[in-house]
Image (spheres, rainbow, N blue to C red):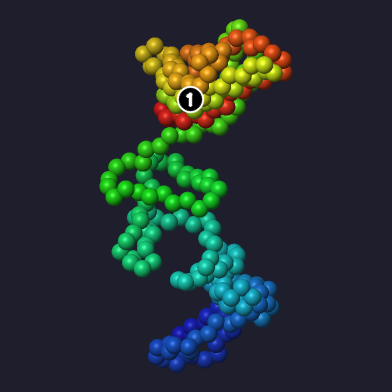
Amino acid sequence: MRLLDFSDGYDSASAPDSGNVAPGALTLPSYASDAAYVTAKGSAAAAGDVYYNTADTAVKAYIAGAWRYVVDRNSTETLQNKKFEDSSTVIADASDPTKQIAFDAGGTTSTKTTIRAQQTGNRTLDTPDENGYLAHFHAKSDSGATIANNQGSPSDVTGLLLDKTSYKSAIVLCEIRRKTTTNEAITVGLLHLYYRALSDDWELIDELGGDPDDGVTLTVTAAGQVQYISDSMSGSSYTGTMKFRVLAIPA
């Protein structure tokens, strides 16, 4: 015969009765805090100590040198420092658990993929009922640059540089606005940029519409830097801007 002691702050003085534990026969000790439990126990917390925390309405256990919450099946908890194995973890439909979403954490050793949301409201992403790949564009930037007046030599469009080691092509949605007290020119459209490995060079196709002559010519260097030149717009109080969004396809 052996004595079975539960680490609940109390020691049994005699052998337990034989038989099964009946429902409701075993009750965890209840305390308002970890400190209250330790005080009642009369010694420091030890691995395996368990009690019911009345303040948090949760079961707590002393594991690996710290008090930790025991998560039950239906409790609402925020989990931290957990890893779920992809081979045994699925997200199941609440009404029909046979409808499931599974994940496969493939890829290269010691790497991870981060899914980052940037919504400003509730969003829903629907997947088609077919096999395939998730195609995507990389939103490299939302930026703006100054277009100077009468810029005779090529000048960099700030923020519009494509690194060939990271990107091989891009579509740029842009708007160019130039204005003085007596003149105004606006163009909106797309720039197509693509890298040619054979010549180690970038090329640019301009598809801008609006005013037929905005006085701005765009080019791209072999390093992937978009540049511009501009004519002289008459009038005073000149302002010139180029706003753009880059959708770059990763290398």
Q: Residue furthest top?
A: 152
Q: Badge 1 is on which residue? A: 189
**Is disc 1 placed on a helix, strand or loop?**
strand
Coordinates of residue 179 in the picture (x, y in percent):
64, 19
The answer to whether 226 is drawn above or below residue 28 in the figure is above
Question: From this viewpoint, is residue 235 visible?
Answer: yes
What residue appears at the point 55 percent right and 90 percent down from the top-left corner?
13
Q: Residue furthest front?
A: 182
| 246 sits to left or right of 178 | left
Q: Residue furthest right?
A: 237
What residue appears at the point 45 percent right and 43 percent down from the top-left corner?
113
Q: Residues within 10 Å of mark 1 (few under 14, many from 20)?
A: some
What residue appears at the point 50 percent right and 15 percent down from the top-left corner?
212
Q: Place residue 248 in its image quadrant.
A: top left
Q: Where, quadrant-wise, is the N terminus in this rendering? A: bottom left
Coordinates of residue 117 in the picture (x, y in percent):
51, 46
Q: Nearer the viewer, residue 162 or 121?
A: 121
The answer to whether 206 is drawn above or below residue 153 in the figure is below
Q: Residue furthest left?
A: 130
Inspect the image, locate mark 1, and give the three-letter code of the amino acid beneath it: Gly
Q: Nearer the viewer, residue 40 or 215?
A: 215
The answer to whether 12 is drawn above or below residue 169 in the figure is below
| 37 sits to left or right of 196 | right
Q: Place residue 181 in its image quadrant.
A: top right
Coordinates of residue 100 in the picture (x, y in percent):
34, 59
Q: Where, quadrant-wise, is the C terminus in this rendering? A: top left
